[in-house]
Image (tube, rainbow, N blue to C red):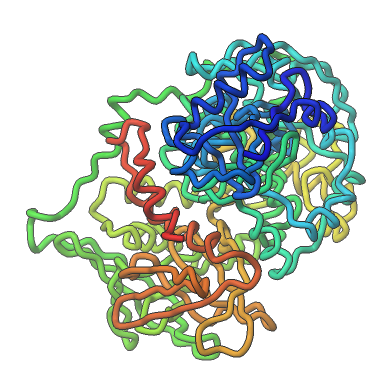
Amino acid sequence: MNAVQSRSPQGSTAEGEESMRFKLRIKGDLHVGGLMLKLVEKISECYDWSDHALWWGQRNMWVLKTHWTLDKYGIQSDADLCYTPQHKPLLLQLPNMKTVKMTVSYSNVVFKAVAEICRVLNIRRPEEVSLLKHTEDCKKKKKKEKNAFLDEVLDMDDLNLNTVASGSPAHSKTMVATYDPENGMPLTATSLWFGDNPFTASQPNLPPADLAKMYQALSLEDKTTINAGWLDSSRSLMEQGIQEDDKLLLRFKYHVFFDLNPKYDAVRITQLYEQARWCILLEEIDCTDEEMLMFASLQYHICKLTTSSEPLDFSNEPEIDEVEAALSNLEVTLEGGNTDRLLVIVAHCVFQAEETVTATVQGVLVCVQGHQHLLLQEQGVFDGGTHRVVPDVNVTDKKFGIKLLLPVADGMNEVYIRCDNEVQYSKWKAACVLASKGKTMAYSSYRSEVKKIQSFLQMKSLAPSPGQSASNVEAMDMVAECFVSPRYAKKHKSKQLTGRIQEAHQHVARLSLMEAKMRFIQAWQSLPEFGIKYYIVRFRGSKKDEILGISYNRMIRIDMSSSLPVTTWRFANMKQWNVNWEIRQVAIEFDQNVSIAFSCVSCDCKVVHEFIGGYIFLSTRSKDQNETLDEELFHKLTGGQE
């Protein structure tokens, strides 16, 4: 063997590593554990080497199977190995834009490393989370981000939270922060961290000037560059070029948030809210002016509760009894019931088969024996269980629309429903949403779904309730520009914007802190572009690059020049998919003999393959799993056969 290099236990500098370099003469039948023992004897230094392992830089791989012989690994005389700790410090930027320094495994696959990180942070469902790195183009764009808020680093060792073995974080230190009015709230002293974990607290809003430095108008091409940075879940950090003290982003990768429960998910909900908040503020997802004000009012309310001078009391948060939760999830169907029982909604609506064709017809939604159909005079019958529902609502303009994406052989057709009022819209929307999940109006959740939609519409309404006015709102020194995107702030004068946010705040003023965060997340999920990741691809047989959007339930083919969708395919209609690793091409077969194939331009095809397999894996989750994950199935669906 040429050399074995050992990282100095006292330091990690290049000089320290070079001084710990040895040449060893060994035989190929020696097992890896024996080689490590010889190296430790050669070093003759008293130190706990239990976390150390051999890294083979020439092959970009860990040598972890200590019972294997060197010949079995293929280690020859020219091998240059590094004896280094498996756990190293890593800088992680959390969804709330705060950076923490913590020790993570560089030898485990990313899937396991993220699970360890989530255990430390007390985040349930780690399969929804992953690590994202900035590409070079993104790093250049983000140079303007630097400010004190983003550059602050919290050392997890200092916070005494690295107690993974016990299964729960230790009590954190109390940190006191004083917020400036520029952050959107009046000057007040309050505890920044509270509870058993420091990551249940929402961060103060940035001053408008700092927010403007972060803001970048992102095109679809820009988004493809960002999304190319997701790490491979089936390979380790070291194998993907991540070095000690590098900085990665911890983000919710898969946008299917399973079993969100305020009783257990304080950290998870807060970090989800923060990821959604920055997504809105930096306009990473499009929303209307009305929706921007709704999000601003919720942010204002959450910020107000967070910086309250009185201690926050979690006892007021709704407790969810496990028995009641189980009962509420029981749904009653019509199967086996009275065959002549019908549930019908009759509504005079406007249906559009295309943008240019409009006809006023009568629509009837019928549920018979557990099956739901949408019957439209002159338009035919659509199976209610195969469509996708997209809201098209503007409460201020009295626009209540629903877009149904109906699967056909070569993609999707679109049908638009225009309702007359909020009540009509709520009934149609609730019925269509349940139908898209394979449920009917006979389910017990139908009425609650209608009420939830009506409540959501009321929250989006910017007019104050009868007898109320903006002048009755509690006066606070507020910089309204902190709660909206810089581009939106330029459209309105500060005083006008403040008044509109305060008016919208009236509809959420009675929400608790956790309820407000949940409302924000739900509103984020209702946006048409929610959860879509974009990639530049070249479809088989095409001579030009196009954009592929991947969401939790569908893939969208988008024309790059116009940014308009061309075709949509649903995962529910997928029969199989595979990757030709030699030519790096993804091939997918759908029902009705539809097949597509494409190569990836903006990233490796493994990134796209993992998104498809990951969403299919997440669709198999159930509450019966009791928090345990089938990791083998995850890697089978996402790892591929490279």
Q: In which quarter of the image is residue 182?
A: top right
Q: Tell me which residue sits at (20%, 64%) in the image.
A: 371
- Where residue 615 appears, as percent x and y from the top left, is 43, 55
Q: In this view, does 618 lie to the left or right of 307?
A: left
- Where residue 410 appears, as percent x and y from the top left, is 40, 84
- Where residue 618 appears, as percent x and y from the top left, is 40, 49
Q: Tell me which residue sits at (50%, 25%) in the image.
A: 34
Image: 484 above or below 87: below
- Where residue 285 appears, as percent x and y from the top left, is 66, 59
Q: Is residue 578 left or right of residue 478?
A: left
Image: 360 above or below 15: below
Q: Is residue 77 visible?
A: yes
- Residue 524 versus residue 618: which sits nearer the camera? 618
- Residue 262 versus residue 84: which sits nearer the camera? 84
- Residue 332 versus residue 583: which sits nearer the camera? 583
- Residue 129 versus residue 384: which sits nearer the camera? 129
Q: Quadrant of residue 408?
A: bottom left
Q: Is residue 582 left or right of residue 374?
A: right
Image: 467 above or below 51: below
Q: Is residue 511 visible?
A: no
Numbered label tally: 0
**Quadrant assignment for the N terminus:** top right
Q: Tell me which residue sits at (52%, 23%) in the image.
A: 317
Q: Tell me which residue sits at (71%, 70%) in the image.
A: 221
